[in-house]
Image (cartoon, rainbow, N blue to C red):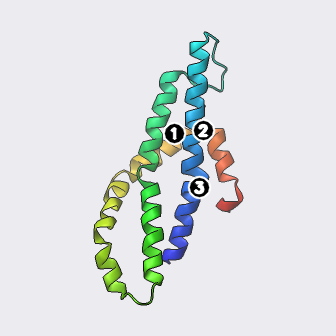
Amino acid sequence: TEESYVESLDVLVSVFEQPTQKYLHELANKSAQHIENSVPLPPNIPPPLVASELLNQHNKIFGNISLILKFNEVFLSMLRDASTPIAEVFKKNSDFFKMYSDYCRKFEVALSQIKSWKEGPWMSGFIRACELQPACE
């Protein structure tokens, strides 16, 4: 159902996308601070170029998923409104469905990138911690 889809999108955004973005920004800041202070990087902090690339990869993985969630929340509320025929709801929102084309086009690349993160030194532990959250059960 649209309702369960919105719930799943919310988990994806709140448990994975937003925390990952925050974590990567923290890594990038720590990396930059170590370099600015001429302090050697500990093994759990990537060099600045790697931290920057991880942020770019985050955008490749998650793309416009937050916008898709927001659209689907509005779309669901419109579907629940009994005064509007369902066909009219789809017609009014047809342009918004176009945002899925970008998401679908990049899906395989995103899956490949996630696999790489799970196997790599910088993100594997973080991803596992996200996966173990109760919302993912």
| Residue mark closest to the camera, 1 vs 3 | 3
Q: Name the residue under label 3.
A: 14
Q: How many C-alpha atoms fall within 10 Å of the one at disc 3: few (<14), some, or many (≥20)?
A: some
Percent position of residue 51, x then y: 52, 28
**Depth check: 8 or 95 in front?**
95
Alpha-carbon span between mark 1 and mark 3:
22 Å
Q: Which of marks 2 and 3 is nearer the N terminus?
A: 3
Tell me the residue at 54%/21% (across/down).
47
Q: What residue type is disc 1 on?
A: Ser
Query: Circle 1 sits in a helix, a strand or a loop, which is it?
Result: helix
Tell me the residue at 66%/46% (across/down).
128
Q: How many C-alpha atoms fall within 10 Å of the one at disc 2: few (<14), some, or many (≥20)?
A: some
Residue 118 showing in the rendered view: no
Q: How many C-alpha atoms fall within 10 Å of the one at disc 1: few (<14), some, or many (≥20)?
A: few
| Residue mark closest to the camera, 2 vs 1 | 2
Q: Earlier in the sequence, mark 1 or mark 3?
A: 3
Q: Mark 1 points at which residue?
A: 116
**Depth check: 44 or 111 in front?**
44
Q: What residue type is disc 3 on?
A: Ser
Count the marks: 3
Percent position of residue 21, x then y: 54, 42
Query: Circle 3 sits in a helix, a strand or a loop, which is it?
Result: helix
Q: Name the residue under label 2.
A: 23
In which quadrant will I find the C terminus?
A: bottom right
Is 98 on the left or on the right of 78, as rendered? left
Q: What residue type is disc 2 on?
A: Tyr
